Amino acid sequence: MEVKVYNIQGQETGRTVELADEIFGIEPNEHAMYLDVKRYLAAQRQGTHKAKERSEVAGSTRKIKRQKGTGTARAGSIKNPLFRGGGRVFGPRPRDYRIKLNKKLKQLARKSALSYMMKEGKIKVIEDFTLEAPKTKEMVKILDNLQAGNAKALLVLGDVDKNVYLSSRNLPLVKIVRGSDLNTYVILNGGNLLISESGVAQIEQTLKK
């Protein structure tokens, strides 16, 4: 499919770029996107949670009262989970939350996410640009020109320019990523996708493998 290329003033350049239909024009697979987003979010979990169980808390192992005749339930240890300071029953333990997905499924999910955003009209291709100096005002102006200033914006570049990155890092709704580093969660959570021409080339090179 052919789409127009815009400059950073928000004007059409008169040029078009051909987007691969097998990446930007497929029928989105919602289940594949769900699984890949779930995988990404699970991998963000640190998994270092830990609570001490009965065998791990400090305390005497002496039987705290006689077995019978007290009128209350029997108790054999101060580390009993029923007592204050006792161990926790089935407490959390360190674990790895990562989920394994096949490479082809992850590729299908990314293609589905890009195709979904294209159908929603949230993808705009812009020409490659750079900034002479890091200025947040300049980046805000560029986003306003491209009608992406009041919402989330994901800037997909071929190679992240230092000045562009520094100009956008104070903007909470703006995220910059290289085309080769895109994942399903970032695409779907990005809001408006502003993809540079070199970013398009990287995306297609990565997903056509």
Image (cartoon, helix red, strand yellow):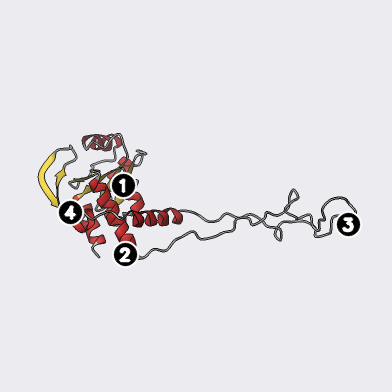
The image's mark for residue 19 is: 4
Dot 2: within a 10 Å radius of its alpha carbon, few (fewer than 14), some, or many (20 or more) residues? few
In terms of sequence position, does the residue under pointer 3 or pointer 4 come before the other?
Answer: 4
The image's mark for residue 104 is: 2
Residue bearing mark 1: 176
Residue 111 placement (x, y as % from top left): 27, 56
Q: Residue at x 11, y 42 (%)?
A: 13
Q: Residue at x 41, y 57 (%)?
A: 39
Dot 4: within a 10 Å radius of its alpha carbon, few (fewer than 14), some, or many (20 or more) residues? some
Q: Residue at x 70, y 54 (%)?
A: 87
Residue 179 sits above or below residue 137 on the image: below
Residue 136 sits above or below residue 28 on the image: above
Task: Verify CB contact (< 8 Å) between mark 3 and mark 1.
Answer: no
> Please, what is the three-letter code of the amino acid marked with disc 1?
Ile
Q: CA distance from mark 3 to mark 4?
A: 81 Å
SS at mark 3 in the image: loop
Q: CA distance from mark 2 to mark 4?
A: 20 Å
> Please, what is the three-letter code of the amino acid marked with disc 4?
Leu
Q: CA distance from mark 2 to mark 3?
A: 65 Å
In terms of sequence position, does the residue under pointer 2 or pointer 3 come before the other?
Answer: 3
In terms of sequence position, does the residue under pointer 2 or pointer 1 come before the other?
Answer: 2
Q: 40 or 149: which is nearer to us?
A: 40
In terms of sequence position, does the residue under pointer 3 or pointer 1 come before the other?
Answer: 3
Q: Residue at x 88, y 57 (%)?
A: 68
Task: Verify CB contact (< 8 Å) between mark 3 and mark 4.
Answer: no
Residue bearing mark 3: 68
The image's mark for residue 126 is: none
In terms of sequence position, does the residue under pointer 2 or pointer 4 come before the other?
Answer: 4
